[in-house]
C-alpha cells in the first residue's frame, strides 16, 4: 500500500532531523531552464510542506539573465506557493546540513498554477495513461569539466581523448565523488566515460517514470555542479561552453509500456518490425519528427543550443530517424541480448541540458501521443548521415533541416496547436516571452557575452 501524504511528510521531517539538516531547499526549474529555489528551516518544515513557500508570480516571467519579460499576468501583483512533493525528499551529500525537494507551483487555493512546469508534465503523463501508455524516460548527462583561471576565464581540466583512460585518471576523484553523491540520494548510475571534447564527461542514470525522471534530472544537475565546485572545479552543462569544442547534449531516451499489462509489455518492441520497432513506436517517433520545429524551442531552448545543432556534429540537424544513427533527430537504440524487449527504446538527440526537464518531457509526450493518435509515419529510416544526401534526395525523403535559431523555433512553437494546447495559454505566453527576450539580448551581444552567461548557469 502506498504511503499517505501525511506519512511522507512525517518521514521527510524525521529524515531531516536525523541528518541534522537545518535548511531544506524547495527547488523549481523556471522557464529559462535555471534551477532556483527557496529554503525553510527544519523547525518549520512540517507546515511548510503543507503550506508551501510564497513566490511572486513574476518569477515565471524571469529569464536566465534575470530580465523580467512582459507578461500581463506576471507582474508585481500576485503570489503562488512552492509546495514540495515529500516523496522527493533528499539529504544533499554535497551541502552540509542541507536537504531538498522538488515542488509544484500551486495557487493560493491549492490548485495547480497554469504556469507550473511540473503540473504540465503531470497532465501529459495522465494523457498518456488515458491512452493506455506508461512511459519510461531518462536523460544522458554531458558536461565540460573546467577550472577557473586567475583572470576569471575558464579552461578545460584536460585535453584527453574520447573514452581515454587518461581522461578517467585525471577526473577520477571528482567523478567518484559525483557517483557517491548520486547513490547516496538513491539515483542509480549506469555508465560514465570521458567524451569527445577536452574535459568533457558523460554519465547515465537509470530510467524511471517521467515525473521521477524529471525530478532525478534536477537532482543530478545539482549534484554534478555542486560536487565539482567542492573540488575546486566548474562543471558546465551548457550546450556550447567552449565554441571550439564538442557541445554537450542531453539526449532524452523514452520507451512506451502497456497499462493493461501493468507496465510489463513494451509497446515499442516488435521482433518482426523494422529494427524491432513496432507500429506504435514508429507513430510516436513520427509525432516527434512532425512537431520537431516547435519542439526544439523546449528541448534545445537556449541561444547557445544552436551552435551545437549543426550538420556533421553528431548532435542531429535534420528531421529524420534511424537505427543507431547518431546524426538522426531520433535514434533507435540497439537492444541488449539479456533483455531485448526491456531495452527497446529510442532517444531524441535534439535535446540539451539547458532544458527545463518537466517542459521537455511533457512536450515530447504530447508530440508522440499526437503521432499515435494520427498514425503519423516517420518515413523510411535513414542509414547514413543525412547531410551527405543532396538537397534533392533529402526533399524526396521528406528530410528537412532544423530551424537554425531559437527565434525560428519559437515561431514554430507558437504555430504548433498541439504543443500550445498542451502547455496552455499562460505557460505558452510566459515561456515564449522569456525565450524571446533571451534571444534579443544574446543576439545583440558577442560570443564572449554568450559563453559567459551560459557557462555556469547550466
Image (cartoon, rainbow, N blue to C red):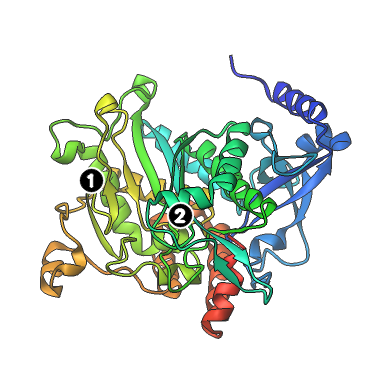
Camera-nearest residue between 179 and 247: 179
Q: On the rendered structure, is 94 left or right of 330?
A: right
Q: Residues within 10 Å of mark 1 (few under 14, many from 20)?
A: some
Task: Tell which circle, 2 or 1, labels the residue nearer the N-terminal end.
Answer: 1
- Residue sitting at 64 percent across and 34 percent down? 88
The image position of residue 297, as x and y in percent, is 45, 64
- Asked if residue 300 is positioned above or below residue 100 in the image, the reply reads below
Q: Quadrant of residue 25?
A: top right
Left or right of 351, for residue 44: right
Q: Residue furthest top?
A: 1
Look at mark 2 in the image and give the residue it sits on.
Answer: 421
Residue at 26%, 40% in the rendered image: 281
Dot 1: element = loop
Residue at 69%, 32% (x, y): give it: 86
Q: Is residue 21 visible in this depiction of the protein?
A: yes
Where does the image place residue 213, in percent across and percent down from the top left? 50, 39
Q: Nearer the viewer, residue 127 or 208?
A: 208
Q: Pinpoint residue 326: horizontal percent, then vertical percent.
A: 28, 55
In the image, is residue 369 above or below residue 335?
below
Q: Nearer the viewer, residue 385 or 152?
A: 152
Disc 2 crowd rating (10 Å Cα; few below 14, some 14-19, many 20+) is: few
Residue at the (82%, 28%) spot, across then down: 17
Seen from the viewer's position, the closer of residues 414 and 44 is 44
Which element carries disc 2, helix, strand or loop?
A: helix
Q: Which dot, 2 or 1, sits closer to the camera?
A: 1
- Residue behind mark 1: 375
Report how far apart the C-alphas of labels 2 and 1 lie in the structure. Answer: 19 Å
State the image quarter where residue 399 is shown: bottom left
Disc assigned to residue 425: none
Amino acid at each position: 500500500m502506498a504511503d499517505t501524504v501525511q506519512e511522507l511528510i512525517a518521514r521527510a521531517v524525521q529524515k531531516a532531523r536525523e541528518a541534522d539538516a537545518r535548511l531544506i531547499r524547495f527547488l523549481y526549474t523556471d522557464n529559462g531552464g535555471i534551477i532556483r529555489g527557496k529554503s525553510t528551516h527544519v523547525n518549520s518544515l512540517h507546515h511548510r510542506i503543507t503550506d508551501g513557500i510564497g513566490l511572486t508570480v513574476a518569477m515565471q516571467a524571469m529569464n536566465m539573465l534575470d530580465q523580467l519579460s512582459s507578461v500581463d499576468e506576471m507582474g508585481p501583483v500576485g503570489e503562488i506557493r512552492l509546495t514540495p512533493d515529500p516523496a522527493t525528499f533528499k539529504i544533499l551529500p554535497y551541502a552540509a546540513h542541507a536537504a531538498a525537494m522538488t515542488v509544484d507551483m500551486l495557487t493560493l487555493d491549492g490548485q495547480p498554477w497554469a504556469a507550473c512546469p511540473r503540473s504540465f508534465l503531470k497532465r501529459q503523463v495522465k494523457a498518456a495513461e488515458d491512452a493506455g501508455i506508461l512511459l519510461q524516460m531518462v536523460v544522458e548527462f554531458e558536461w565540460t569539466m573546467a577550472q577557473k583561471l586567475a583572470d576569471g576565464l575558464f579552461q578545460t581540466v584536460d585535453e584527453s581523448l574520447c573514452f581515454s583512460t587518461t581522461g578517467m585518471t585525471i577526473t577520477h576523484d571528482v567523478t567518484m565523488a559525483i557517483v557517491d553523491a548520486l547513490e547516496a540520494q538513491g539515483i542509480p548510475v549506469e555508465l560514465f566515460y570521458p567524451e569527445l571534447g577536452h574535459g568533457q564527461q558523460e554519465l547515465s542514470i537509470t530510467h524511471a517514470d517521467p515525473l521521477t525522471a524529471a525530478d532525478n534530472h534536477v537532482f543530478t544537475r545539482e549534484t554534478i555542479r555542486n560536487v565539482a565546485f567542492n573540488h575546486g572545479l566548474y562543471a558546465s552543462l551548457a550546450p556550447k561552453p567552449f565554441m571550439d569544442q564538442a557541445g554537450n547534449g542531453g539526449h532524452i531516451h523514452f520507451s512506451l509500456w502497456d497499462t493493461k499489462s501493468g507496465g510489463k509489455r513494451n509497446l515499442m518492441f516488435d521482433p518482426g518490425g523494422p529494427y524491432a520497432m513496432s507500429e506504435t513506436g514508429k507513430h510516436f517517433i513520427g509525432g516527434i519528427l512532425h512537431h520537431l520545429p516547435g519542439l526544439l524551442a523546449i528541448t534545445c531552448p537556449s541561444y547557445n543550443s544552436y551552435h551545437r545543432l549543426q550538420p556533421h556534429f553528431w548532435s542531429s540537424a535534420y528531421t529524420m530517424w534511424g537505427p543507431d544513427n547518431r546524426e538522426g533527430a531520433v535514434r533507435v537504440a540497439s537492444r541488449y541480448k539479456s533483455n531485448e524487449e526491456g531495452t527497446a527504446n529510442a532517444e531524441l538527440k535534439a535535446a540539451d541540458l539547458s532544458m527545463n526537464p518537466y517542459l521537455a518531457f511533457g512536450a515530447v509526450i504530447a508530440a508522440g501521443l499526437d503521432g499515435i493518435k494520427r498514425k503519423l509515419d516517420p518515413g523510411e529510416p535513414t542509414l547514413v548521415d543525412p547531410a551527405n544526401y543532396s538537397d534533392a534526395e533529402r526533399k524526396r525523403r521528406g528530410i528537412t533541416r532544423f530551424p537554425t535559431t531559437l527565434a525560428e523555433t519559437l515561431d514554430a512553437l507558437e504555430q504548433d496547436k498541439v504543443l500550445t494546447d498542451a502547455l496552455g495559454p499562460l505557460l505558452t505566453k510566459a515561456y515564449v516571452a522569456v525565450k524571446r527576450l533571451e534571444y534579443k539580448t544574446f543576439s545583440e551581444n558577442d560570443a564572449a557575452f554568450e559563453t559567459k552567461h551560459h557557462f555556469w548557469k547550466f
